[in-house]
Image (tube, rainbow, N blue to C red):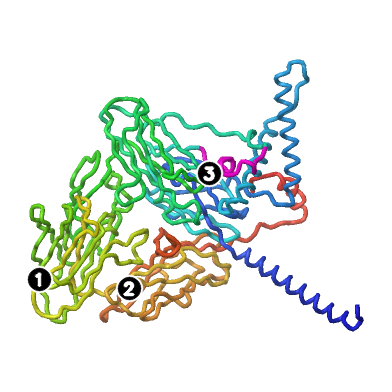
């Protein structure tokens, strides 16, 4: 080496070393900031007043893990965490595993040979063997599907007085807090199939990864006969069919309602895709008597079967393409319980009692009196009604006058209405077109909007506005109109039209189904009015994890309606100590803006639930709306939806446990062998 070049090369080497060190430190920092992604939760619900084991899966899980539920009445205690074996420990654990298997084989052999001396094999040895086998299988599973690399178990207790219905479940720890998944609280007895293990999946997808260890893995027992009413929880593995034996009595109207896609309506990744459940009911002679692969436009199947005789029937559930993995979780409600299939009208005027006609199975009443003191779209109070129904069914209330269509026999509707108005109608016959006639003035702005799919109805609406002449010429028409505030609606099939009337006179609003479909379920609400500017706000994401004294930023998405274009300001409602807002507004004509959530240095550690309000000026008046927490989720790798969730959670990281040298020395040998934190 040229002596003159040595200092230069030394400097170059030090620069490269510093660059590498900087890259490593940045990678470490990114690892520290990276959040937790929850891949699945099983079971996806439980009965109040019970305690049960809950399993969650994620790509990675910190040791100080906690489960965070929305609402009150649910407690969870971490039992164990199962993670892939670190590369540095794999050879050592493989050696220990070989030794345990050899000793167990020797013990089994001496148990068969009466002349051989007894071999020592304890319950602790057996537990250790199963622990290492689970770790080995988890390591293999993490290599082929990183989304399921970590697995944790909790003991969950639901209080007897916990509110019924849907909750949010997140997991939180040193790595942050996860987006929520759906968790249900029910009052029906429940039973759960053994949770799907990594070994169950890997033994199908790539048996060579487990090698000779597969035969030593113990499998839990399968449940016996089910006496409805009951909720059955399960997971579908690759190529798997679950079969449940059900005791049924003659004349019983057995309702089978599956929740599968509802629990995870958006893709986690590309392969294998959505869980598309299909069910088949077999009679005691194992002949198929009923089946379903969907319920109207919902992918989750529902069926009702009247049993002609007593016996043990078999219900089979599978993915329609025989796919499967850990996040193919299902809940089946089965029994002779009341189930609503249809209702009409789909709401009523604000402040007035409306008689709703109900249709369905096992219903004890066919009329329900409903009242709302505020305008908007609302979920059904199923617990108070003591019935079950599709989770997508909704009711709507409005301040406008309302009326019901007067159909002509088999020819749809041609009806004069007084503008403005909300009209309740049904497309009852194939190819039917409902026509509503109203008086308009030159230069008048008219908005016509259909609410059907957003209320859980199957109508794929086509809507047109035009003059009332012998030959109808539309001024404006629409098929599908995207509503970013609609939540978990994967097909925006409702229509909205806005136009300016060219002259005084009579005009028509025409409603039909794009595909010519019809029936009592094809109900709708049609609003005819001048523009009514309004807005909704969604805060994304629905959870953040700032440090004490730091700021976290979320995005406020403004859903603008009927031409509203003003500024929107966000504020905290009844903020707990330690939390405040910085910048929190969306400028005029913009559809999103940042909201800064500040934490003080004395903010309490752990979860804090915040509520937000949005304020704007409309027509010179101050208007307040709740700012709803939501997640921006993607479907079909192109369209994104703002999906509302139950609560907004700020997770303030808890201080790490104090460690001293003596305690570390005591903990280290046990930590190398334990799966519980």
Q: Main secondary structure of the magenta part?
A: helix
**In the rendered view, would you say 429 is above or below 503?**
above
Q: On the image, which quarter does residue 123 sit in?
A: top right
Q: Nearer the viewer, mark 2 or mark 1?
A: 1
Does residue 338 appear to the left or right of 194 in the view shown?
A: left
Where, quadrant-wise, is the N terminus in this rendering? bottom right
The outermost residue toward the top is 115
Q: How busy is the neighbourhood of tag 3: few (under 14 within 10 Å), some, or many (20 plus)?
A: some
List x then y, in percent, for residue 565. 32, 79
- Residue lying furthest bottom in this view? 4
Residue 154 in sight here: yes
In the image: residue 184, left or right of residue 360: right
| Mark earlier in primary sequence (2, 3) | 3
Task: State the residue at coordinates (45%, 38%).
Answer: 241
Circles 2 and 3 in contact, beta carbons < 8 Å: no
Q: Position of residue 144 (x, y in %)?
A: 60, 50
Q: Which residue is mark 3?
A: 155
Q: Residue at x 32, y 43 (%)?
A: 302
Among the 4 quarters of the image, the one containing residue 332: top left
Q: Earlier in the sequence, mark 2 or mark 1?
A: 1
Residue 373 shows up from this direction:
no
Q: Which mark is residue 468?
A: 1
Whether residue 421 appears in magenta in the rendering, the answer is: no
Q: What residue is drawn where x is 71% and y is 33%?
A: 101
Q: Of the residues under marks 3 and 1, which one precedes in the sequence? A: 3
Look at the image and give the residue range highlighted in magenta: 194-211
Residue corresponding to mark 2: 560
Q: Residues within 10 Å of mark 2 (few under 14, many from 20)?
A: many
């Amino acid at each position: 080496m040229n002596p003159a070049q040595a200092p230069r090369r030394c400097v170059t080497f030090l620069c490269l070393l510093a660059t590498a060190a900087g890259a490593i430190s940045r990678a470490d920092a990114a690892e520290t900031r990276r959040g937790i992604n929850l891949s699945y939760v099983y079971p996806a619900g439980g009965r109040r007043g019970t305690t049960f084991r809950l399993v969650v899966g994620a790509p990675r899980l910190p040791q100080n893990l906690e489960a965070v539920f929305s609402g009150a009445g649910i407690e969870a205690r971490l039992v164990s965490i199962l993670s892939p074996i670190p590369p540095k420990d794999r050879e050592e654990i493989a050696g220990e595993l070989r030794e345990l298997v050899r000793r167990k084989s020797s013990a089994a052999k001496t148990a068969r040979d009466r002349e051989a001396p007894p071999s020592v094999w304890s319950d602790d040895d057996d537990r250790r063997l199963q622990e290492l086998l689970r770790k080995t299988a988890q390591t293999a599973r993490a290599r082929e599907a990183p989304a399921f690399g970590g697995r944790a178990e909790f003991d969950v207790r639901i209080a007897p007085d916990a509110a019924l219905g849907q909750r949010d479940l997140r997991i939180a720890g040193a790595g942050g807090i996860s987006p929520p998944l759906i968790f249900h609280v029910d009052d029906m007895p429940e039973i759960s199939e053994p949770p799907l293990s990594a070994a169950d999946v890997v033994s199908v997808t790539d048996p060579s990864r487990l090698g000779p260890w597969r035969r030593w893995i113990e499998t839990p027992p399968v449940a016996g006969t089910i006496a409805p009413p009951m909720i059955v929880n399960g997971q579908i593995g690759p190529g798997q069919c679950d079969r449940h034996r059900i005791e049924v009595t003659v004349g019983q109207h057995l309702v089978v309602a599956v929740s599968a896609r509802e629990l995870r309506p958006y893709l986690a990744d590309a392969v294998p895709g959505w869980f598309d459940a299909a069910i088949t009911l077999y009679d005691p002679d194992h002949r198929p008597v009923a089946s379903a692969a969907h319920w109207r436009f919902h992918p989750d199947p529902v069926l009702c079967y009247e049993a002609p005789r007593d016996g043990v029937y078999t219900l089979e559930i599978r993915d329609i393409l025989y796919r499967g993995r850990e996040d193919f979780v299902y809940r089946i409600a089965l029994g002779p319980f009341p189930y609503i299939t249809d209702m009409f009208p789909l709401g009523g005027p604000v402040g007035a009692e409306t008689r709703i006609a109900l249709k369905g199975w096992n219903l004890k009443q066919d009329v329900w009196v409903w009242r709302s003191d505020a305008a908007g779209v609302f979920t059904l109070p199923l617990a108070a009604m003591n019935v079950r129904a599709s989770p997508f069914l909704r009711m709507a209330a409005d301040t406008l006058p309302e009326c019901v269509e007067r159909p002509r026999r088999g020819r749809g509707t041609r009806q004069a209405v007084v503008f403005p108005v909300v009209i309740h109608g049904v497309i009852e016959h194939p190819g039917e077109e409902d026509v509503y006639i109203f008086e308009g003035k030159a230069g008048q702005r008219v908005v016509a909007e259909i609410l059907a799919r957003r209320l859980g109805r199957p109508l794929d609406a086509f809507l047109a506005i035009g003059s009332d002449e012998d030959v109808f010429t539309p001024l404006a028409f629409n098929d599908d109109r995207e509503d970013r505030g609609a939540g978990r609606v994967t097909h925006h099939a409702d229509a909205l039209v806005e136009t300016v009337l060219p002259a005084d006179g009579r005009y028509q609003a025409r409603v039909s189904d794009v595909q010519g479909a019809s029936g009592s379920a094809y109900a709708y609400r049609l609003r005819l009015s001048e523009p009514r500017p309004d807005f909704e706000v969604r805060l994304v994401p629905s959870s953040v994890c700032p440090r004490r004294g730091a700021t976290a930023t979320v995005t406020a998405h403004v859903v603008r309606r009927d031409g509203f274009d003003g500024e929107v300001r966000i504020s905290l409602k009844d903020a707990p100590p330690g939390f405040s807002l910085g910048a929190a507004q969306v400028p005029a004509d913009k559809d999103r803006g940042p909201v800064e959530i500040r934490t003080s240095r004395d903010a309490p550690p752990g979860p804090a639930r915040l509520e937000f309000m949005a304020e704007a000026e409309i027509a010179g008046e101050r208007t307040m709306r709740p700012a709803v927490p939501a997640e921006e989720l993607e479907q079909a790798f192109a369209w994104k939806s703002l999906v509302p969730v139950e609560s907004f959670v700020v997770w303030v990281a808890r201080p790490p446990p104090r460690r001293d040298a003596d305690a570390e020395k005591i903990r280290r040998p046990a930590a190398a062998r334990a799966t519980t934190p």
